Every structure is written in structure tokens, then in C-alpha cells.
Amino acid sequence: MPSQPQPAPPPPGPAAETADTDADTDTGTDTDADADAGTDALAGAQQLTDVITRLRRALRSSIRSEFPWEALPMAQVELLQTLAASPLRVGELAARQRLAPNTVSGLISKLLDAGLVDRQPDPGDRRTARIALTEAGHQQLRDWQSAHERRLAAALESLPPADRAAVMRALPGLDHLAHSLAGTDPAR
């Protein structure tokens, strides 16, 4: 581990004597603890990244047998999930998904062609349209969600009870982490 920079020595005088006395009793554990915490956080972040990546990959591949993935790519699913709450303009969707508006427009075109969304006039601005789920879009989203829940429930059931309990105990922390990463942390 690289050494931590040492603070500059205090100027001579009475304050220096106090600082020297404090320095004699300071074991440096705060600096060591901070460095250890930073190393632990980085190692934890690396492990979490690896687990999340493998979990997403496993979810995507496991669902293919029950739900034709090519019919509904994850980017489209995420748009449908966002639209399930209420109709939005393309710009609002782009901002919520943190995607470029032209990317969202392309995804919306595919969803329009598939009959999963439609355009509605925006009551506040007749020059713009809001994108809303159709009944087929709601059904497609319900089917996708149900298939994922069945897969996850079966996987959870296959775990030893202690592992299943650990996963369930981690959910509130993971939820807070997701909000923190999205900048929507309700604790703030």
C-alpha cells in the first residue's frame, strides 16, 4: 500500500510543543483506518460490480427460455417500466433513463411499431406528444415481470436458507445504493 503523505511540521513556538505532544500520543491509526476503509470500499465496489454484472447476465440468459428476449430488449423494458407510472415526453424519458433523446426516439419508434406504446397529445403543450403504454404494452410488461419473478423465486428457493436470508437482508441497502447512484436518495 502506498504511504500516506505526512503533514508539514508545525512552526516553532508554543503551538509546536502542543503539536509535538499530540504527535507523540497519536499512533497514526486514523490515517491507517481511513486508508483501510478506502481500500475496503474499493474492494467491495469491485466485488459488487462483478456480482451485479454476473447477476444481470444470468437474468438475461435465464429469461430467454420463457420470454423471447429478442422481442423486448432490456432498453425497451426499462422504457416500458418508466412509462407504466405515467405518460411522458421523449425528453423526459431521456432524462430519466439518462440516455440521449435520439436514442430514446429510436427505441420509441420500435415500441410504436410493435404497438406497445402510442403518442398522445400533451394537454399542456399541443406542439408536443406524450408517450403512453398501450394495453398491449402493459400486458407485455406484466408478462416480462412475471417471468422474471418466477425465475428469481426459483433461484432464491434453490439457495440454502442462510444465503436466501442474507440476500433478503441486503435488499434495503441495495435499494439505498441504487437511489444514491441515481441521485434520488430518499434519505437526503
Image: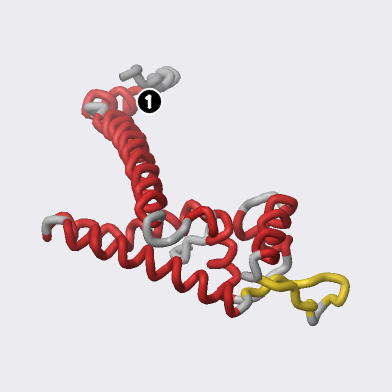
Q: Residue at x 52, y 55 (%)?
A: 74
Q: Residue at x 38, y 61 (%)?
A: 66
The x, y position of residue 101, in whole percent, is 73, 54
Q: Judging from the image, what secondary structure is the residue with disc 1 in?
A: helix
The x, y position of residue 14, in whole percent, is 38, 25
Mark 1 Cα-neighbour bin, 10 Å: few <14, some 14–19, many ≥20: few
The image quadrant where one finds the N terminus is top left
Name the residue at the right extreme: 127
The residue lying toward the viewer, choosing from 85 and 48, is 85
User: With respect to residue 161, does 116 lie above or below?
Assistant: below
Could you tell me the amino acid type at mark 1? Pro
The residue lying toward the viewer, choosing from 137 and 99, is 137
* Horizontal side, residue 115 vs residue 171: left or right: right
Residue 161 visible to the viewer:
yes
Quarter holding residue 30: top left
User: With respect to residue 111, does 142 lie above or below?
Assistant: below
* Horizontal side, residue 23 vs residue 95: left or right: left
* Horizontal side, residue 70 vs residue 116: left or right: left
Q: Residue at x 27, y 58 (%)?
A: 170
Disc tally is 1
Quarter holding residue 31: top left
The x, y position of residue 149, in whole percent, is 34, 66
Residue 34 visible to the viewer:
no
User: What colouring does the structure picture have?
Assistant: secondary structure
Task: Return the residue at label 1.
Answer: 14
Q: Residue at x 79, y 82 (%)?
A: 123
Name the residue at the bottom extreme: 123
The x, y position of residue 138, in whole percent, is 54, 75
